[in-house]
Amino acid sequence: MKAKFRKRLLLSLAFGALVFIGLTVFADAGKLAAAFGQFTWALFPVVLACSSMNYLFRYLKWDYYTRVLEIRPSTSANIIIFFAAFLMAVTPGKLGEVLKSYLLKQVNGTPIARSAPIILAERLTDFIGLTILILIGAWVFGQAQEVIVFFAVFFSSVTALLAWRRGSMAVIRALERIPVIARHAHHAVEAYDSVHLLLRPKVLFNAVVLSVVSWFFECAGFWIILHEFHAPPTLLKASFIYAFSTIVGAVTMLPGGLGTTEGSLTGLTMLAGASRDIAVASTFLIRVATLWFAVVVGIVVTLAFQHRLNIRIEDIDIDTDTVHAG
């Protein structure tokens, strides 16, 4: 593993620890320990199972996209590629997930410019799916409705622009006039061809359905934790809180949404009627079961199966190879 990425991972771990320490102080360490003491830990594997279902449906979306673009690695290679990228879950804005495109190039020679748009389509449909979950719960929760409408309009507008080939090509042609960008223009055109295929109505609909289902499982995991704590939020309110907090964390572009996601989860859970210590304990548990569980999965898959892809993960420089390859 390159020293630069190892350093970033350690910094993210340190930042995550600081967030947890700050929330512990906020909740009062004694009360927080008491809250953890009343949690039925036998239920935690169920929460992890909900996260695993999220990963499964997100993999199905990744596999679907690779088939739409006629990128056909073996099923085993595609599974390894998808889950190895979880190692990058704590990179800013999840940009490290471009590792998936790098690995596809290593496996079957697919140009990065052709496969990288899958990452964009994944994130876009994730946002749409989360926004749908937010809309479902928002009217019950009765909070932030203006912000929700903004998210819905924004992501719908971005999707419509990307799906409008003439408009998107006009933007690309305009960017070609900028000297720094001009030399990469042919990659932009190739990338847009992939984006356009991925945003066709049928493909977009199927991907959004997979997104809604996948993220609902993590919302359900959060509700299971709250329910065990006898906290007030219903399943719909828990879905709103989790989906909204996930989007807030994502748009900040912070590694794994650290700080902002935890703050949103805690604040909204308290707003829904939970005590401070229960809100913080619930936030700790769901973040361990989602973000940090994903990082562990990524590390395990990477170390166990990198030989199947005939590469050495420690030799990959995600900042340079993925940018200049393809």
Image (cartoon, grey):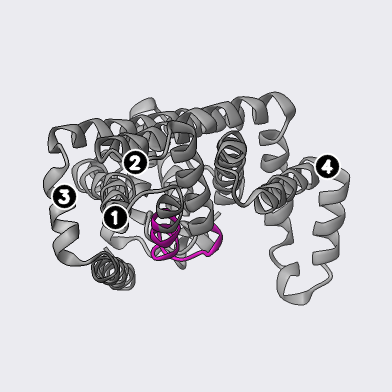
Give 79 or 130, whichever is nearer the viewer.
Answer: 130
Residue 72 in view here: no
Is 44 on the left or on the right of 258, as rendered?
A: left
Can the viewer see residue 75 in this picture?
yes
Give amino acid for label 1.
Ile
Q: Residue 83 — which label?
A: 2
Q: Residue at x 55, y 50 (%)?
A: 112
Span of residues in magenta = 251-266
Question: Callout 1: helix, strand or loop?
Answer: helix
Q: Earlier in the sequence, mark 2 or mark 4?
A: 2
Instruction: Residue at 26%, 50% (x, y): give it.
Output: 288
Residue 254 sits inside the magenta stretch: yes
Say above or below: 288 vs 178: above
Residue hosting label 1: 313
Figure quadrant of the N terminus: bottom left
Between label 2 and label 3, give the one nearer the viewer: 3
Mark number, residue 326: none
Label 2 vs 3, first from the N-terminus: 3
In the picture of the structure, the residue carrying the numbered disc 4 is: 164
Residue type marked 3: Phe
Distance CA(mark 1)–CA(mark 4): 38 Å
Which residue is identified by label 3? Answer: 36
User: Between disc 1 and disc 4, whose residue precedes?
Assistant: 4
Location of residue 152 (image quadrant):
top right
Q: Are marks 1 and 3 in contact (CB under 8 Å)?
A: no
Query: Relative to residue 129, is residue 280 depicted above or below?
Result: below
Q: Say if 52 sits above or below 1 in the image.
A: above
Amino acid found under the numbered disc labelled 4: Trp
Q: Residue at x 72, y 56 (%)?
A: 186
